[in-house]
Image: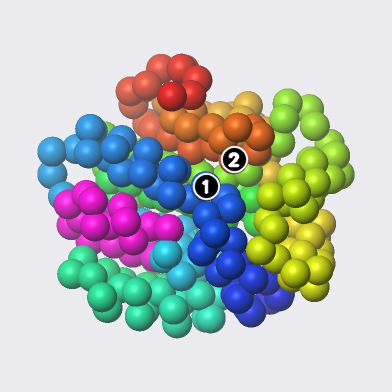
Amino acid sequence: MADALFQEWRVYEKLLIHDYMDHLAFFDRLAREITARFDRPVAILDLGCGDLTPVRPLLAAVPVAHYVGIDESEVALSIARVHLEEGAVPRQLVAGDMLEVLKTQRGPFDVIIASFSLHHLADPDQKRAVFAACAPLLSSDGFLAVIDVFTSPLEPRDEYVERWIHHADTRYVALGPEEKQLLFEHVRTRDFPVSLEECRILGEAAGLPGFIVLLEDSPRLNRLVALSAAKLWGQSRGTE
Ligand SMILES: C[S@@+](CC[C@H](N)C(=O)[O-])C[C@H]1O[C@@H](n2cnc3c(N)ncnc32)[C@H](O)[C@@H]1O
């Protein structure tokens, strides 16, 4: 079912312009991790790529063999096509549900990015299916980079939603009342985040036991987590 926030895009675009979700810091940290781990151009798959605004600095900062972005929002992809035309990276944008499109991908990918997209999968089985589909697509030293909102341990969803809305109501000052209403309705009906421990378990079950939190924001809502087949990072070493 179409999501009003992502079909219309204008309100979400405002969040990106004002960097309210700290995309700049998360993608900068991810670019540094990629640079540190690979001495070759990397193949990147981006699940729920949106309009590519946040990933563009990363695509400029690291050597990219090729980039594949998947999204179900045609509006987001129409902006993404313009953004990609401005870059020199070999690229492909695929419209559709990530679960279906993942079945058509051959890999290997060095980095699979899921930035603020996995929490939109309402059914736990969908989350399990995405992790399971990603694992065999990764190169042996590759990793799944999840940038997303997370619940606190054992936090019920309704408490998480109220915590998120309180945070956004205070911080997202450039949004007008109607824009906030659209955003908050989206979060109430479309956001199904997991805790860090649930994310770790999803990875382990899919054959990605390596798990580390690479960056965490100060309200402890958003994190960058890396998962890998090799226990490259051991257990979480916390934030940097
Ligand atoms: C919050 S936006 C994030 C966009 C971008 N990755 C970013 O960080 O700004 C979530 C994106 O995931 C897409 N999305 C949500 N569920 C999806 C699904 N099942 N398959 C493909 N795309 C999906 C939405 O259309 C939207 O563009």
Q: Residue at x 60, y 32 (%)?
A: 218
How many numbered discs? 2
Is residue 69 visible in the rendered structure shown here?
yes
Amino acid type at mark 1? Asp
Q: Secondary structure at mark 1?
A: loop
Query: In the image, is the residue at mark 1 within 8 Å of ligand 1 by its beta carbon?
Result: no
Q: Which image quadrant for residue 157? A: top right
Q: Which mark is residue 222?
A: 2
Residue 57 image offset from top left, x and y in percent? 32, 56
In the rendered image of this protein, does residue 109 appear above or below residue 219?
A: below
Dot 2 and dot 1 residues touching (CB under 8 Å)? yes
Residue on which the image places disc 1: 22
Q: Residue at x 48, y 32 (%)?
A: 215
Amino acid type at mark 2? Asn
Query: In the image, is the residue at mark 2 within 8 Å of ligand 1 by its beta carbon?
Result: no
Image position of 5 (left or right of 203): right
Query: Which residues make up the magenta segment?
Result: 54-69
Q: Which image quadrant for residue 148? A: top right
The answer to which of 5 and 230 lies nearer the viewer is 5
Q: Residue at x 71, y 75 (%)?
A: 4
Residue furthest front as drawn:
173
Is residue 102 visible in the rendered structure shown here?
no
Q: Is residue 66 magenta?
A: yes
Q: Secondary structure at mark 2?
A: strand
Q: Which mark is residue 68?
A: none
Point out the tag, 2 or 1, that comes first from the N-terminus: 1
Q: Residue at x 18, y 57 (%)?
A: 65
In the rendered image of this protein, does residue 206 appear above or below residue 238?
A: below
Image position of 3 (left or right of 145): right
Residue 82 image offset from top left, x and y in percent? 35, 80
Question: From the image, which quarter does the N terminus lie in?
Answer: bottom right
